[in-house]
Image (tube, grey):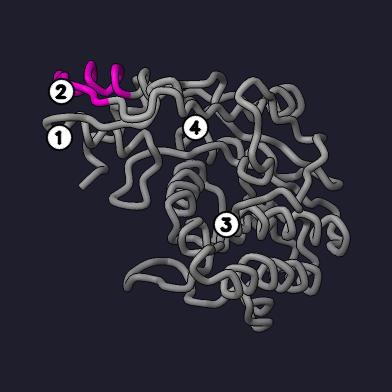
Amino acid sequence: MKLFVTGSQSFIGRRLFARCKALGIDAVGIDSTVPAGTLATEADIRDPAIADLIPEGATIVHLAAMSRDPDCRADPRGAFDVNVTGTLNVAAAADKRKAAQLIFASSEWVYGDVRNDGVQLEDHAIDVTAMKSEYALTKIVGEQCLKLTCKLPGVTVLRFGIVYGPRPSNWSAVEALFNAVREKDVVSVGSLATGRRFIHVEDIVSGILKTVGRTGFEIFNLSGDAIVTLREVIEQSAQVLGRKPPVEEKTPQAVSIRNPDNAKARQVLGWKPEIGLKEGLATLSQGLK
């Protein structure tokens, strides 16, 4: 197995490389910025020359993207250039190098605004005209472009849930609340009943590797096994840290629930999340600065 990873220096990319090294999987990668001493190549996913960097017959894991919604909103042209044009260029390079498979990192945000009592499944129709997130729009367009134009033996779309884990920046609600419990005199939150199927980065890496070798066009949600509320994140963080600051709930009525079901990934891939919330929070102690 040979993996070629775009966005190799990203949060998920670094963890994927570490797992590949531990398992003896041959992996190479590119990123727009590569620190000195890193075994990766600096390259732009929009550059046709990246085809020369892809090992023939490799499986491509396409993680590179403009992924923060505020950045995409501030520069929608740049977001579409990177997330859509870049994806099409990666697909063209993959075809040129006779890649076996392209694994595309998408997001649960492609489901758009959802009802609190809804369940998001991979075969649900998505109304792009109702989308309010530029980032989500670039991802669903990228998915559809791959479905229509990519002729590789396998194209696998992975819609990630809200990913968390030890990292110094770009935090999800999990890392932000954990840090607030650790550092703040008062923890402020919108609605304690807001919930997501949070998923630890190591479980995302396991899910990516489970899809290697798939054929055809497929979509999988990679999300946690259950909805976890912000109240639970705060309470579990307090237990892990041995600290219990008071909590200020600013807008208790503004509840937001997202529920991307992972049953298909469990059944078809034989994958399941292995890291529970308390165990996942324990990994944050050394990773947040």
Distance, label 3 to label 2, CA atoms, is 37 Å
Label pair 1/2, CB-CB below 8 angstroms: yes
Do the residues bearing badges 4 and 2 touch, measured as CB atoms within 8 Å? no
Q: Disc 4 on helix, strand or loop? A: strand
Residue nearer the viewer, 196 or 91: 196
Q: Nearer the viewer, mark 3 or mark 1?
A: 1
For disc 2, the marked residue is: 245
Instruction: Kindly indicate the quadrant of the structure image that contains residue 56.
Output: bottom right
Indicate which label's residue lies in the foreground, 4 or 2: 2
| Residue 194 rendering spot, x and y as whole percentages | 46, 26
Name the residue tied to disc 3: 63
Name the residue tied to disc 1.
184
Tag 2: residue type? Pro
Decide: is 286 above or below 249.
Answer: below
Tell me the SS state at disc 3.
loop
Distance from label 4 to label 3 (Cα)? 17 Å
**Where does label 4 land, which residue?**
199
Q: Earlier in the sequence, mark 1 or mark 2?
A: 1
Decide: marks 3, 1 in contact (CB < 8 A)?
Answer: no
Residue lying at 76% horizontally and 27% vertically, measured from the top left: 268
Q: Residue at x 81, y 51 (%)?
A: 154
Question: Given the image, on which type of amino acid does mark 4 rest?
Answer: Ile
Name the residue rendered at 72%, 59% in the picture: 142
